[in-house]
Image: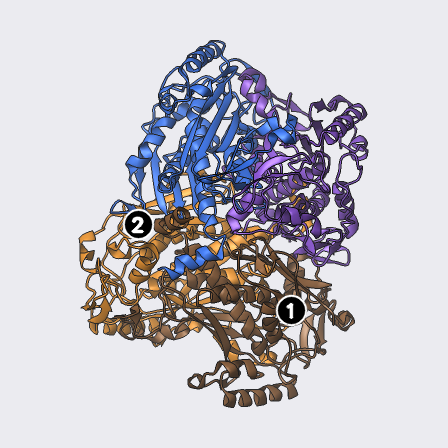
Chain colours: A orange, B brown, C purple, D blue
Amino acid sequence: MAGSSFGKIFRITTWGESHGPALGCVIDGCPAGVELSEADIQPFLDRRKPGNPAVATARKESDTCEILSGVFEGKTTGTPISVIIRNSDQHSGDYDNIKDVYRPGHADYTFDAKYGFRDYRGGGRSSGRETAARVIAGAVAIKVLGRLGIKVEAYTRSIGPVEADLSEYSRSAVLANATAMPDIDANARALEYIADMKNKSDSCGGVMECIISGVPAGIGDPVFDKLDATLAQAVMSIGAVKAVEIGDGCKVAKSVGSKNNDQFRSSKDGVVKKSNHSGGILGGISDSSDIIVRASVKPTPSIARSQKTVDNKGENIDIEITGRHDPVIVPRAVVVLESMCAVTILDALMSGMTSRIDNLVSIYKNQ
Amino acid sequence: MAGSSFGKIFRITTWGESHGPALGCVIDGCPAGVELSEADIQPFLDRRKPGNPAVATARKESDTCEILSGVFEGKTTGTPISVIIRNSDQHSGDYDNIKDVYRPGHADYTFDAKYGFRDYRGGGRSSGRETAARVIAGAVAIKVLGRLGIKVEAYTRSIGPVEADLSEYSRSAVLANATAMPDIDANARALEYIADMKNKSDSCGGVMECIISGVPAGIGDPVFDKLDATLAQAVMSIGAVKAVEIGDGCKVAKSVGSKNNDQFRSSKDGVVKKSNHSGGILGGISDSSDIIVRASVKPTPSIARSQKTVDNKGENIDIEITGRHDPVIVPRAVVVLESMCAVTILDALMSGMTSRIDNLVSIYKNQ
Amino acid sequence: MAGSSFGKIFRITTWGESHGPALGCVIDGCPAGVELSEADIQPFLDRRKPGNPAVATARKESDTCEILSGVFEGKTTGTPISVIIRNSDQHSGDYDNIKDVYRPGHADYTFDAKYGFRDYRGGGRSSGRETAARVIAGAVAIKVLGRLGIKVEAYTRSIGPVEADLSEYSRSAVLANATAMPDIDANARALEYIADMKNKSDSCGGVMECIISGVPAGIGDPVFDKLDATLAQAVMSIGAVKAVEIGDGCKVAKSVGSKNNDQFRSSKDGVVKKSNHSGGILGGISDSSDIIVRASVKPTPSIARSQKTVDNKGENIDIEITGRHDPVIVPRAVVVLESMCAVTILDALMSGMTSRIDNLVSIYKNQ
Amino acid sequence: MAGSSFGKIFRITTWGESHGPALGCVIDGCPAGVELSEADIQPFLDRRKPGNPAVATARKESDTCEILSGVFEGKTTGTPISVIIRNSDQHSGDYDNIKDVYRPGHADYTFDAKYGFRDYRGGGRSSGRETAARVIAGAVAIKVLGRLGIKVEAYTRSIGPVEADLSEYSRSAVLANATAMPDIDANARALEYIADMKNKSDSCGGVMECIISGVPAGIGDPVFDKLDATLAQAVMSIGAVKAVEIGDGCKVAKSVGSKNNDQFRSSKDGVVKKSNHSGGILGGISDSSDIIVRASVKPTPSIARSQKTVDNKGENIDIEITGRHDPVIVPRAVVVLESMCAVTILDALMSGMTSRIDNLVSIYKNQ
């Protein structure tokens, strides 16, 4: 069944395989009148690209995007925005050795079980390359959210055992550091850890976190499309993510009500909270505090050391996965997290326009 | 915007407030020919009801369900199944004191921000009582899954600092213990901890876990409707859940590829895995191992001790929340977790029927 | 698969069989703050009820509706509105004779083919009684549309060969006449024709039309959710409707461009059209003229004269359908047409709030 | 709001403007294992292209399609199929004269009203060129339906006053005749009529009809996704269609029950009908007879003679629309009708797999 669309009002549809001719995204439902060009999207794609060879694959893709529809005279028209990236560095031959083999930790076996066969080149549709299309959508959503004063910023919180020191948070450090960590010291230690993993033909995981600030109170649609629920779907759908937390997340299980409750107080900006254990969401609806989303990412499954597995004839074999692979995917996934959060928040904000009769009257009586 | 439906093929719609005349669920898309009566649903509702006064509210609701449509001569007809529960013990007067006040940790403020006002009686739509409707849907889904040999079983894994010993797992203990923990010893210690919380006018949280066994490989729809992604939405939409984990969950962030990868091997039952760090899902598709879903639940926000907050005029006030409240909601939420997992898995299984042309041919050429 | 929901933002879900205990509708996504009570809905249900014995069945149903959720202190809360009607006059025994037989022109055979069996009592889910739930939704939608100055009014245009004279249109005549025709003379002739049909143990069809006025230009979502397309789905889904026309409808096939094009002109109210062949929709988007929707309704399939058919063992048999049946269903279907048009228009209007970035900014910056 | 997707299980999303760089379609949910290449799609696109200068525009587009994803080693993989057509003959300069003007019968005014501005080049998204993307989807659906022995064939039934003689139906004539009429004589007379229209700087409409044969009984999802309802949406969403009829369509309004009811009889092929007034659908579900869908198409709104209209400053002006325009669009729309019917039927068939528990068991127990 169709599973490549996300969002109800601002709806994105992605397509494309790792080693097909191209991949892309159709963004349907973007409001008209937003200034948009490839230059708004490309910097986000560049953040996803392999950069520092210490942390990333050697695959060389320019990931140059082209807008094919939905923008006229520099502005969105309200019609579907189709954006495409041609694949260039495909090296399909590299994958003949995994053609008939189920790589541990990968989706080779499950795709065969579902569809009967698969495009095995570079993981096909299950490749991390698929996320480039999500980043396109995220860049557009972030542009629209900017018009409302909403910011969406993600970073690496930990890699293996190395934790970032958030008290030293610097956005420029996130963008400059090869690990996308917000502090320089942790970045250095994480790079050492990654190098060690690489030497051992092993890989590691980590935690990434996204802060969405400026969202007004009142966004999210109980009971199934609560804001935390749709964020959870959005973020868990990113390959390699195995846990999604909102606010204090797993820690709440050991907390107590008197500490975990965020007490309200009145301020000149209206109702505010004295703490933010809730991560900006109460009852599935934004409470105007920062929205905090955290994702745990598993170690890259592709490792060069020998592993036991089976082939598609059911024979037990050993496999070593050579070729181009990131020892850790967190640094490149940070912008994907940002993108999925942005798309989710924008869709919920657009949905929220219809929550009160007064809004309906104000839009149509003022026109 | 409409947010009270979940699922695409097996789609549930819930409605009802805590202190309205009734609440209910419409199940649309259930296959025809499944034996179904109230007797299949009631035991699940009974598990959600407050039982042991040590862990639960004193609200007395019989929660007797009535099937109003979609079943004829004891079998589902394929048309919408409407099930209703009349509310009896409403005590609406109890809530006059919170009418104008935003309780910390509750959705009072966010509902007002979204809709302009709210049904304040017992939390209205944001009450945990809403989950009774989910349990109705879950009971039906579990009945259908049973026809395929699929089991869905949840339990309490921890309450506050007390962890269950899973090596002592017993399903009957889960059903008998007031905490829904699977071992007797942990149950006893958890009850002590809860009693302590109650004495301190405080509350606690915990962790619940669901195991879904018997799901064939191949279920889930990449890239946004991956099985883990839809499970994440389903589970995060349960009130008070702040984190959702699949398989090893958060732990993967500190693991390494050589350990986290589940190696495949051939067996008489086909392809199996030597471990199950993935929690039964690879690339968003079931891998035929047990599917493992875990949720962290926050402490009950309603506590009797004094808290600072604001009222709906923006005045700072103090509040003590008296009345009927669970000191911990995990034990009663376990069946809700089970229900949401069951609905999600069944919807994905029904969707999976269309993944291969051979299935389409086999259904229509054999008829 | 789930097929009992309609609308995306203002979404309705109906349930219930002709002879089950009850039927109802869940309205999800209705804006908060709209005054609503059963008294807003009941008059619409009363219009659908059999009244004049000349044109309608003798089934006696009070069709008293009860709102079970989504309304608090007289206003919609933004949460799902569940409305229920208990069935009283079920006479299930009447239907034993059709239990195993496929009535010509009815859905008995197709329901059995789809689901394997069916609730045969009074047609079960395929009964016209299902439309009572649509009328509930329509009444709510019409209430909301009223806040925007939008009116939705349907009437009978013809019954068999008898055409109404629209130059004599009177809304009070529509509501008073047993045929729901807008002029008294045609009403009288139509009643004679219906009486003649009844004497001959036969039945007849007709045409009904709905005018929606006050819809601003700009509503409808190309290319598949064009306003005429969603209206077509909504109206064709009413049982017995076999054709849907917008504006000049079928006549356009024989017209020419120079006549069919509605020329624009400038007026003090903005852009207006000198004619309305388009029926208020251009390119799938409202053009601010009256929206005109027309539906052709087939003769009631239940007739007392002998017909050839088969039973569910595949045996050829003869059948005479006795019992309570309308000789024509158009008069009672008029309010159903009105309802489906209202729901469709409201959903499209709510969707239209998101078409421009300026609207998004205006809603969120003004709050 | 997003409006460019159609279908639930087999879901298509189209994008692209008349004079943008490209247009295309993403087909999500196509079953895996279907042989597919550009050669399956191109002949359908060729039927939509302007051919005979007597009936069509002089715009020259090769309409060469390229499959960018979802097909591997000649077979569909179950992942989204993205197909693109580059625009070549754009002549955007031709449209400067309509930049600020609202052409009568076109969507210029309504797009401006909805979105605030529009891509005016060739009608932008509202151009008939958008339908090329629908034909891509239709070609794929027809390929899949072929595996089930289902055929979808449309033709022109009338142009202006000229009616085809269906007793002379020949599929090769439909494909060979410039009008897509099924008989040679009517084709000749229609061409004369069209030539006459062209000489008068006028345009004409017509009726097209689609027959879908081989659909088993039991397809369609009451009550809102009835097969006739989704067909009505699909067909009414084609630009210029103003009426959709199923089976006898509008004629039923003047028929009587004893004639309009199709009597059943038993045959060696199971239950059959002695007539097919219902057009293959009863109660919204296929009855195994041919499904008959008819659409009335308005005259091309672009005509060379002078018309009164307004510009986007609200000034009254006169306009003559020169350039490349079809005097009648029916012949080229026939393949679009076929496409939309095919997509709708396939989506409904895939949905129908889940209607019985036996099917679910048979798919999962046999694997």
The picture places residue C321, in percent across and down from the top left corner, at 67, 40
Q: Which image quarter holds the C terminus of chain A?
A: top right
Q: Secondary structure at mark 1?
A: helix
Circle 2 residue: A63
Query: Distance between the Cα atoms at labels 1 and 2?
Result: 50 Å
Q: How many marks?
A: 2
Residue A289 in percent (x, y) is at 56, 65
Residue type at the position of mark 1: Arg
Identify the secondary structure beneath mark 2.
loop
Residues packed near mark 1 inside 10 Å, few (<14), some (14 to 19) or many (20 plus): many
x, y percent for residue C246: 60, 29
Position above or below: B241 against C145: below
Same chain shared by disc 1 and disc 2: no
Please, what is the three-letter code of the amino acid marked with disc 2? Asp
Residue B353 in view here: yes
**B68 sits to left or right of C116:** right
- Does residue A255 lie above or below C107 as drawn? below
The chain ID associated with circle 1 is B
Relative to residue A63, is residue C167 depicted above or below? Answer: above
Can I make out residue D310 in this image?
A: no
**Which residue is more in the foreground, B33 or B30?**
B33
Looking at the picture, does residue A150 appear above or below residue C175? below
Residue nearest the viewer, comparing B243 with A55: B243
Q: Chain of mark 2?
A: A
Residue B129, disc: 1
Q: Judge depth for marks 1 and 2 and give the one in front.
A: 1
Tell me where residue A169 appears, x and y as whole percent. Answer: 43, 68
Q: Residue at x 70, y 55 (%)?
A: C22
C293 and C79: which is toward the camera:
C293
